[in-house]
């Protein structure tokens, strides 16, 4: 019996080798490329599609998202947090599911809508801002956070295929008047949905990440303190109506 099992394994190996040998060189190369493509992660394909090399924090966030974690990204303005949101949408397209991009104000929603239309075309992108409704059943929908909160309470059928929600400017959770909207969205989204939170101004980001994990499950916190765009603070001073205003460095030492 031992000899028979060994013989069976050899037969299988011989059979596979014979099948590979039977293929033409072009067919073997095509099979090799197909195998390599399957081994490559979605995040690595996305990174190669970008016109610049991704920073470490962007790669870490994208890998965590592909591994089905929720992701909270805290990085200075101009650091490139939006790249993580773009990957979430890219991943949703790869997996044939829906992604929502939420912002706190209509102007940001309108801007992001036009950006995504340039990338994916008008047929795949929608916009919902309360007074504007464009292609609301699209695979990618940009909206204000209040609109998503209302959809949750209405049990909208649009949520059925939803798997990714980007919460841009998620630090609004600390806002006394509008914060409950973000909190309700995070709590009431279906558990099948992964959250991508983007913020530049969360001071207690570790506590915030732990709270999201307690509500949503596995959550990866990604923090970058590198500020690629210098932060300079100035004040505009005008002595009277007859003089030109002067822009003064707030921390200038003479």
Image: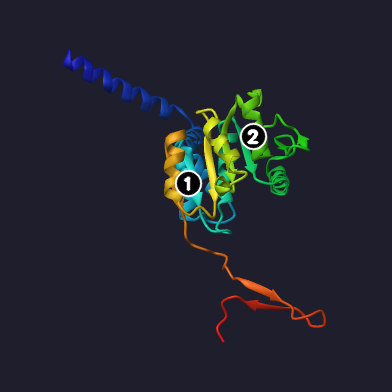
Which residue is farthest left?
2
Q: Residues within 10 Å of mark 1 (few under 14, many from 20)?
A: many
Q: Nearer the viewer, residue 32 or 143?
A: 143
Residue 44 image point, x, y percent: 49, 45
Above or below residue 1? Residue 166 is below
Mark 2 falls on what kind of element? helix
Q: Nearer the viewer, residue 192 or 32?
A: 192
Residue 156 image point, x, y percent: 65, 24
Answer whether residue 17 is visible to the viewer in this image.
Answer: yes
Q: Quadrant of the C terminus?
A: bottom right
**Residue for point 27% across, 23% down:** 10
Residue under numbered circle 1: 61
**Residue for point 62% across, 43% down:** 178
**Residue for point 65% across, 23% down:** 157
Which residue is farthest top?
1
Residue under numbered circle 2: 148
């Amino acid at each position: 019996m031992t000899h028979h099992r060994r013989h069976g394994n050899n037969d299988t190996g011989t059979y596979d080798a014979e099948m590979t040998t039977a293929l033409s060189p072009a067919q073997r190369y095509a099979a090799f490329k197909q195998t390599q493509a399957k081994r490559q992660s979605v995040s690595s394909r996305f990174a190669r599609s970008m016109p610049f090399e991704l920073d470490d924090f962007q790669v870490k966030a994208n890998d965590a998202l592909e591994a089905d974690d929720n992701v909270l990204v805290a990085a200075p303005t101009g650091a490139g947090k939006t790249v993580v949101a773009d990957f979430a949408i890219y991943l949703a397209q790869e997996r044939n599911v829906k992604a929502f991009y939420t912002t706190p104000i209509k102007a940001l929603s309108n801007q992001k809508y036009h950006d995504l239309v340039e990338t994916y075309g008008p047929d795949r992108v929608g916009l919902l801002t309360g007074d504007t409704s464009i292609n609301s059943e699209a695979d990618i929908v940009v909206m204000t956070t209040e609109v998503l909160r209302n959809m949750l309470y209405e049990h909208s059928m649009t949520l059925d295929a939803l798997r990714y929600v980007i919460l841009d400017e998620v630090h609004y959770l600390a806002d006394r008047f509008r914060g409950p909207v973000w909190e309700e969205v995070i709590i009431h989204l279906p558990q099948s949905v992964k959250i991508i939170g983007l913020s530049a101004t969360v001071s207690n980001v570790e506590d915030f990440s732990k709270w999201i994990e307690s509500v949503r499950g596995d959550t990866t916190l990604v923090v970058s303190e590198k500020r690629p765009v210098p932060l300079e603070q100035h004040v505009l001073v005008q002595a009277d109506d007859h003089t030109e205003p002067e822009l003064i460095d707030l921390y200038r030492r003479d």
